[in-house]
Amino acid sequence: MKYVSTRGSAPALDFEGVTLAGLASDGGLYVPEAWPQFSAAELAAMRGLHYAELATRVMLPFVAGSLSEDQLRDLCRQAYARFAHAAVVPLRQLDEQQWLLELFHGPTLAFKDVALQLLGLLFETFLARSGDHLTIVGATSGDTGSAAIDAVAGRERVDIFMLHPDGRVSDVQRRQMTTVLAPNVHNIAIDGSFDDAQASVKRMFNDPAMTGRFHIGAVNSINWARLMAQVVYYFAAALQLGAPERKVAFSVPTGNFGDVFAGYVAAQMGLPIERLIVATNVNDILHRALSDGDYSAGEVTPTAAPSMDIQVSSNFERLLFDVGGRDGSALAEQMRGFEATRAMRLTNAQREGAATLFSSARADADDTARAMRWAYEQCGEVIDPHTAIGLHAARAAGIATDIPVVTLATAHPAKFRDAVERSTGVRPPLPARVGDLFAREERYDRLSGDYDDIAAYVAERGTESR
Ligand SMILES: Cc1ncc(COP(=O)(O)O)c(C=O)c1O
Ligand SMILES: N[C@@H](CCOP(=O)(O)O)C(=O)O
């Protein structure tokens, strides 16, 4: 399998190459040169498999040439052994049509663990082959950070520098990152938003002063391997609900467009998906883009769903590339325009291509609180504010009643216990495995958010590559 950049001029790479590269050298994102396909018979044969085996079958075409089937199976078994539920990503029924796919049973209680537990092992495997050292630089609005840190803390050939927006993540999220004291883990709170942090991370991938000394790596969903692992749970849910004979719709609380793009990939591979509902909070650039073609970023507004407080949505570029005819040079120009002005219009081809599968909805604070209350009072489920935004959109989407609608439950409610308590009166307890979080020592540094300060910090503490 070869991967090409959405901006058309970076070299095509194999799976090992894209996993270690993160962002493409032309500033684009890597996507497979063609989508692997599964027939209805192949899909039917996947029903009932254990999650690690399903993951092996779904991901095998993407890793061809870099990992054997047995190597991939071994990594999947290791990655998913750390999940606290036997099904790894259990489904729960809310009413006749609505379902939740619980993605938060991993070590750090959010959907990020599903991909990052595997990515940590992939890094270890590939770096052992090359003998190289990876300097991971990541941005987090709260969940990627802890999941990535858990996946690489203490690993020999990796350092991780994780930027989070100071004061804009929940106390549980912050402590899940800052109480990991392994020497290869560096937490940095920046004065700014997640968008500012993500912009600095992307800039570092194309800063010769840094790339000349360090092998910079990505754990954010700009890294293809992240999305690849997230594709699997769409298969897991749809197969349980009757695919391939029956279609299923998904509602996805969305920020950086990685999770829902994984659903798009599943559909390209032959999974019968009726609709992908993109659910945003009031940081609604994606809702505006999908409903009337306006992709323009304002300032980030803090909400009760802080992990989705994002305006510049990296993975949207992957969709625009695929539905817009895979013209890398045209997209590079469109993205350069966006980077200069923070605004662009989608082309007709991009709008029409997206509309075949996607719809969108925006939830404000009241919608979010109401959805949390509905889940608790009508169905007995305590859900987190991100999941609530997805559920609000799922119930409003008008999907035909014979089609199941699955909302991705992206985080454990205890990560956002203040917001959950305000809406439902219930304060969800922290699961035992993170129970002493508030007794642990914290360690992190504060920086201005200025790129030069961040680069100097990394340069001073990073390990040069060979
Ligand atoms: C709990 C939670 N829900 C939803 C999202 C949005 O996912 P994505 O950025 O892949 O769109 C995030 C952050 O990414 C998150 O942490
Ligand atoms: N919500 C994320 C933001 C980063 O998104 P990613 O999926 O690109 O890593 C977070 O919690 O950090």
Image: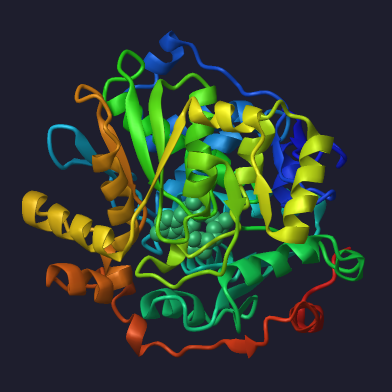
Which colour style is shown?
Answer: rainbow
User: Where does residue 141 sit, x and y in percent of width and height?
Assistant: 51, 68
Position of residue 439 relative to residue 267, above or below, is below
Q: Is residue 305 left or right of residue 240?
A: right
Drawn side of residue 1 relative to residue 152, left or right? right
The residue positioned 63% from the left and 49% from the top of the image is 122
Q: Quadrant of residue 29?
A: top right
Query: Is residue 186 or residue 294 the one in the foreground?
Result: 294
Between 423 and 461, the one nearer to me in the picture: 423
Location of residue 346 in the rendering, given as x and y in whole percent from the top left corner: 64, 39
Find residue 348 and report its image quarter: top right
Residue 333 in percent (x, y) is at 82, 44
Q: Residue at x 9, y 54 (%)?
A: 380
Residue 177 % position (x, y): 49, 75
Q: Nearer the viewer, residue 333 or 18?
A: 333
Note whether residue 428 is visible. no
Image check: 270 left or right of 110? right
Q: Quadrant of residue 364?
A: bottom left
Above or below: residue 201 compared with residue 63: below
